């Protein structure tokens, strides 16, 4: 800061006392847009008012009890003011530490919501996505600024349950849109007319020539990843788009038919069956399909993946009794260190409202808490 600033503040102190000096210092900080200095000014003013040492040298816990609360309140107000000034200047990365310090992410989330894709947004994306301020918007910016590959990798590290389904829907819809655009463009180049439909089955029907030995229209690794994520969803519209993606994937040549993990070894075919069942399309055949997978699987090599998927499917279909039977037969007693992709046996009993079976199974598994829960529901 230049000499003029020091002279102005000194003159204000001489002519108007401490209050005038603080006002002059704050005014200079605002004029220079030195908002970090403004925070220090506000806190210095509060230390003067409370009779505290003017140079802060220790943590807040060291302050006298009577002064601690008003000083903390002054810090919150100053952090809120400074964070707001940074947001007003469009500087989200500089604003975030102040709002984070006072546990108020909402203003930063509101600012992030208005951000449009562009250059130099990596720190904003990090705050939004990895630090959980606005995960969905952060994910949207990743997809728009860095593409599907980065977005899919980021989805694996999604920081919270809230908003995850929205991001999976965005992935499905984006990939479906890209596929439709490229199929329509290819067809128009070959046939001279742009198809009006945006349904993948209609675009590929009767056009086997689209699928040559090395022909593909979206990155196959992206396709397989997004199809896998779609199994978490429950809204019919997006599930329908995911099914269309599997229809396309099944038509690809063997060069692009990569083997997946059991019980989805043939990723597009197996997920197509699973997703259609979630839409109510021939669920009995889907259940039979995955029952065969369980019967054919080797637990020593593939573990219980097939059984978990079958249980999850039966639970999604509301067939809790069957799900419990499969769980009892094929899934061992729960291990706290082991995460299932399906509800546990006791959770299934609760979903079914079968309290007597819950009581018996809890006793067999040595789960005293589950046993008491069942007994309470029966009383």
Image (tube, rainbow, N blue to C red):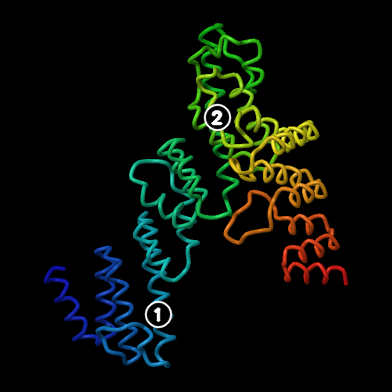
Location of mark 2 (residue):
259
As displayed, is residue 207 above or below residue 60? Answer: above
Tell me where residue 130 sits by quadrant: bottom left
Tell me where residue 88 sits by quadrant: bottom left
Q: Give the label, 1 or 2, closer to the camera.
A: 2
Question: Which residue lies at the image location 66% right of the left edge and 20% below the top edge?
Answer: 201
Q: In the rendered image, which quarter contains the N terminus?
A: bottom left
Location of mark 1 (residue):
74
Residue 247 left/right relative to 69:
right
Question: Which residue lies at the image location 56% right of the left edge and 39% below the top edge?
Answer: 170
In the picture, the disc for residue 293 is none
Identify the residue at the far right of this view: 379
Q: Nearer the viewer, residue 121 or 274?
A: 274
Question: Which residue lies at the image location 46% right of the left edge and 42% below the top edge?
Answer: 153
Q: Position of residue 18 (x, y in %)?
A: 26, 86
Q: Alpha carbon of mark 1 to alpha carbon of mark 2: how far? A: 60 Å
Q: In the rendered image, which quarter contains the C terminus?
A: bottom right
| Sequence order check, earlier mark of 1 and 2 | 1
Residue at disc 1, secondary structure = helix
Residue 365 left/right relative to 223:
right
Q: Nearer the viewer, residue 131 or 314?
A: 314
Identify the residue at the far front of this view: 300
Q: Position of residue 221 (x, y in %)?
A: 49, 31
Q: Nearer the viewer, residue 228 or 23?
A: 228
As displayed, is residue 19 above or below residue 334? Answer: below
Residue 163 left/right relative to 378:
left
């Amino acid at each position: 800061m230049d000499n003029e600033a020091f002279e102005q503040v000194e003159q204000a102190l001489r002519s108007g006392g401490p209050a005038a000096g603080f006002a002059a210092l704050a005014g200079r900080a605002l004029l220079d847009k030195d908002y970090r200095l403004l925070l220090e000014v506000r806190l210095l003013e509060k230390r003067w008012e409370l009779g505290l040492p003017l140079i802060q040298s220790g943590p807040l816990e060291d302050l006298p009890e009577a002064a601690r609360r008003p000083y903390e309140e002054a810090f919150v107000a100053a952090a809120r003011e400074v964070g707001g000034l940074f947001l007003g200047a469009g500087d989200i990365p500089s604003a975030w530490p102040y709002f984070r310090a006072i546990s108020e992410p909402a203003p930063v989330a509101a600012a992030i919501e208005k951000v449009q894709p562009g250059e130099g947004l990596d720190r904003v994306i990090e705050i939004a996505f990895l630090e959980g301020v606005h995960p969905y918007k952060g994910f949207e910016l990743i997809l728009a600024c860095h593409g599907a590959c980065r977005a899919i990798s980021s989805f694996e590290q999604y920081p919270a349950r809230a908003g995850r389904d929205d991001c999976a829907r965005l992935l499905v819809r984006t990939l479906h849109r890209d596929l439709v655009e490229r199929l329509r463009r290819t067809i128009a180049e070959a046939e001279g007319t742009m198809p009006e439909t945006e349904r993948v089955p209609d675009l590929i029907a009767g056009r086997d020539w689209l699928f040559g030995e090395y022909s593909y229209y979206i990155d196959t690794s992206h396709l397989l990843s997004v199809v896998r994520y779609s199994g978490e969803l429950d809204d019919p519209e997006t599930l329908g788009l995911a099914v269309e993606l599997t229809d396309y994937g099944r038509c690809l040549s063997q060069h692009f038919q990569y083997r997946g993990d059991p019980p989805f070894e043939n990723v597009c075919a197996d997920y197509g069956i699973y997703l259609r069942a979630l839409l109510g399309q021939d669920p009995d055949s889907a259940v039979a399909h995955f029952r065969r997978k369980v019967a054919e699987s080797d637990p020593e090599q593939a573990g219980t993946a097939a059984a978990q998927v079958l249980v999850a499917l039966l639970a999604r279909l509301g067939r809790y009794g069957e799900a419990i039977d499969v769980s009892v037969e094929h899934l061992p007693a729960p291990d706290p260190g082991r995460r299932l992709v399906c509800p546990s046996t006791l959770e299934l009993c609760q979903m079914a409202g079968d309290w007597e079976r819950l009581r018996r199974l809890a006793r067999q598994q040595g789960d005293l808490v589950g046993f008491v829960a069942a007994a309470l529901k029966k009383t």
